[in-house]
Every structure is written in structure tokens, then in C-alpha cells.
Image (cartoon, rainbow, N blue to C red):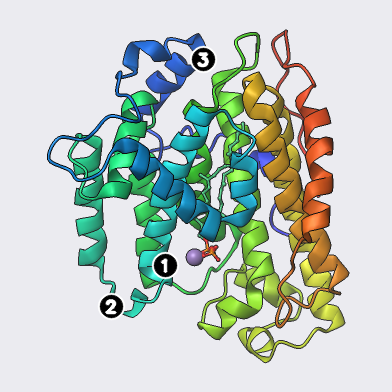
Amino acid sequence: ELGFADSDRYAGRVLSSKFVGKNSRKKAALVKDHKMSEIVVGVKPDMVIPGATYSLKEAYDQCREVCAENSKTFYLGTLLMTPERQRAISAISVWCRRTDELVDGHNASHITPAALDRWELRLEDLFAGRPYDMLDAALSDTVSRFPVDIQLFKDMIEGMRMDLKKSRYENFDELYLYCYYVAGTVALMTVPVMGIAPESKATTESVYNAALALGIANQLTNILRDVGEDARRGRIYLPLDELAEAGLTDEDIFNGKVTDKWRNFMKIQIKRARMFFRQAEQGVTELSQASRWPIWASLLLYRQILDEIEANDYNNFTKKAYVSKAKKLLSLPMAYGKSLISPSTHAQPEPQSMTL
Ligand SMILES: CC(C)=CCC/C(C)=C/CC/C(C)=C/CC/C(C)=C/[C@@H]1[C@@H](COP(=O)(O)OP(=O)(O)O)[C@]1(C)CC/C=C(\C)CC/C=C(\C)CCC=C(C)C
Ligand SMILES: [Mn+2]
């Protein structure tokens, strides 16, 4: 038996901890009470930025292009969003991708903690309405329209600092923290943009917890898909204690042989990722009506990567699990059907423990 019992052990942990401050709760309450208009600054996306050689429309168009190029699965989901949400999500997504590229991209070997500190100063500037470039300008506009907390972006940069320092995770607690930094944050950033349904009686906290679970589920899936690729960069994003319990070592990962021990280990990891997806599901139903279809679509699409790992007989060392275009398109009507389920109209009981 593994050292984790259920995903609820992790639910609420980040929200009630130092990672998401009071400010975020206040903003979350505003989202819930639909007072967002009070904090929305009336900047038109087609306005020309004084002193700049581009318009906001061009800035957002460029974000959209970068998204289409780099985050294909999520991009398909964004196409189902209202134009205003689509713009905001593409600006957030591009900032996340650029942040990740600092430690994963072509110049990664030159990136130092000081460079990440400078990236953080630039973030503060764009939140203060002083964007450095066109892509920052789009995000600067987005954060003036939606109550997104800067701390989440800072936490994501913290995840990149972790990537610079660390290439092994002793146990799932350590891995969970990494997943929060690089992906849970992304999910929490999107909630104020997606909005909670006015008729929903779910607590704001439960919706944020579901979003967090979806971020974690996505990142665990990403990790399980990329085991071989990461190992070739000397990185293992798998809990070492669980590997040892399965009779596996670092060397087994670097050798990349699919054995029964590996299959058994992978089955448990896939089960855990699915558990986080399940935990996220109820939260999607509480989102505003127009946001449910795109989020269901991205959940179903990303979760299918786990099915593909199984279909590849757990060879994630040399085969990249890939969901075909046909399967992606087939998921869209299914996601649409799920988006028709109404939000809860009475207070929800505490979620049941989900055991593996
Ligand atoms: C209530 C409820 C359920 C609300 C929904 C909340 C929500 C939208 C959750 C989804 C959050 C999400 C998209 C998380 C991304 C997780 C992820 C895969 C992160 C990756 C990090 C780094 O890992 P790695 O280096 O291993 O990855 P690569 O091999 O390099 O790919 C990321 C790469 C961080 C960067 C993430 C993005 C660029 C994607 C951001 C996408 C969005 C903001 C779009 C969200 C839109 C939809 C339709 C889900
Ligand atoms: Mn990356």
C-alpha cells in the first residue's frame, strides 16, 4: 500500500496555506458575488497603447498565434470560449509558456536564479500597467479586467526556481508541491476568467479546489507522458520512494526498459492522476455556463493521454502518448453534453474521500 490515501488529503491544502494569500480569497469572493465589473478597467482591446507601435488587438492576436503553435490541446479548448475569455486565457497561457521556456527552452542552460528574479520584476511591472513588450501588454490588460492574483504568477516562477535546483523528488508530497507551482497555479489563475455560475451554491473554495485538482491532474499526466524525454535531460519527476517500493531505481528509468515492475508502477501512477481528474469534475459543473464546454473538452482531451500510455503498453520511454485528431474531435460533443449538466442549487456536502 502506498503512502497516500486519497486526493482529499491534498484538497484545500494549498488554498489554506501561504501559497494563496488573503488577497486571493477576497478576489475569489468578488468572482462569486459577480461584482467583477467593479474591478474591471474599461480598456478596449483595439485601443492603441500610447508610445507603442502596436495595438492591444495585435498583442492579443499574437498571443493567440503563440498558443496555437505551442499548447495545441489547450488551444482547442480555448476555441470554444467567448472571445473575451479566449483573449484573456491566451494572454495567461503565453506568459506561462514563456516562463516555462526560461528553464526548458533553447537558452535554458544560461538561465540563473537572477534571471528569474528579473522575470519577476517584469511581472510586477506589467501588473502595475507597465508592460515590457507586446505579449506582456496583453497580460497587463487581462489582469486589469479580471481579478487574478499576482501571487499565483510568482508561485509559478518559484516552480521554475525549483526546476533549476532539483531534478529528483523523494516522495509524492514533494512532487505535489512542484505540480502546484507549475500547474496548480495555472488552473487557479483561470478561475476568475472562467467565472462561477450565478446559480451555483457550491462554495468558492470548493470550486478553486477542483480547479487546483485539474491543474495537478494535467501536470501528473504531462509527467507520465514525458518520462523518457525528461530522463534524457537527467530529470525524474516520479516519487523515488514509490519507485523503490516497486523495486525500481534511477537506472531503470535511464535504461528505459518496459518490465512488469514498470507496468505495475505506472498503473498506480495513472490511477492517481485519474483520481485528481475525478476530483476536478464536480467543479467544472459549477463554472459559468459558457465556460463549461471548453473546460470539459480540455479535461477529457488531456485525460485521454493516460489511455494512450496504456495503449502503448506503458512504453513512455521511447513512445510519446498522443491523442489522434479524430479522437480529439469525437470528445467535443461528449464535452458539450457534460456542459449541459446544471450547477448544484443547494449547498454541497463535504466531498467523500476517494481511495485508490
Ligand atoms: C473549476 C475548474 C475545474 C476550473 C478549470 C481550471 C483549469 C482551466 C485548469 C487547467 C489548468 C491547466 C491548463 C494546467 C496546465 C498544466 C500543465 C500541463 C503545465 C505545464 C507546465 C510545465 O511542465 P513541463 O515543462 O513538464 O511541460 P512541457 O513538456 O514543457 O509542455 C506547463 C508547460 C506550464 C505552461 C502551461 C501552459 C502553457 C498551458 C496554459 C494553458 C491555459 C492557461 C489554457 C487553459 C485553457 C483551457 C481550455 C484548459
Ligand atoms: Mn516545459
Q: Amino acid at mark 3?
A: Lys
Whether label 3 touches label 1, CB < 8 Å:
no
Q: Residue at x 17, y 43 (%)?
A: 52
* Residue 274 position within the rendered picture, expressed as x and y whole percent measured from the top left: 76, 50
Q: Quadrant of the N terminus?
A: bottom right
- Residue type beneath disc 1: Asp
In front: 182, or 51? Answer: 51
Q: Element at badge 3?
A: helix
Residue under circle 2? 110
Crowd class of label 1 (few under 14; some 14 to 19; many from 20; radius 10 Å): some
Foreground pick, 171 / 217: 217
Q: CA distance from mark 3 to mark 1?
A: 34 Å
Residue 151 visible, this orientation: no
Task: Indicate which disc residue 238 carries.
Answer: none
- Give the mark nearer the N terminus: 3 vs 1: 3
- Marks 3 and 2 sit apart, C-alpha to C-alpha, by 43 Å
Q: Residue at x 46, y 36 (%)?
A: 87
List x then y, in percent, for residue 322: 74, 66
Question: Where 197 sits versus 183, above or below?
Answer: above
Label 1 sits on residue: 163
Which of the two discs, 1 and 2, sits closer to the camera?
2
Q: Nearer the viewer, mark 3 or mark 1?
A: 3
Q: Earlier in the sequence, mark 3 or mark 2?
A: 3
**119 and 9: which is toward the camera:** 119
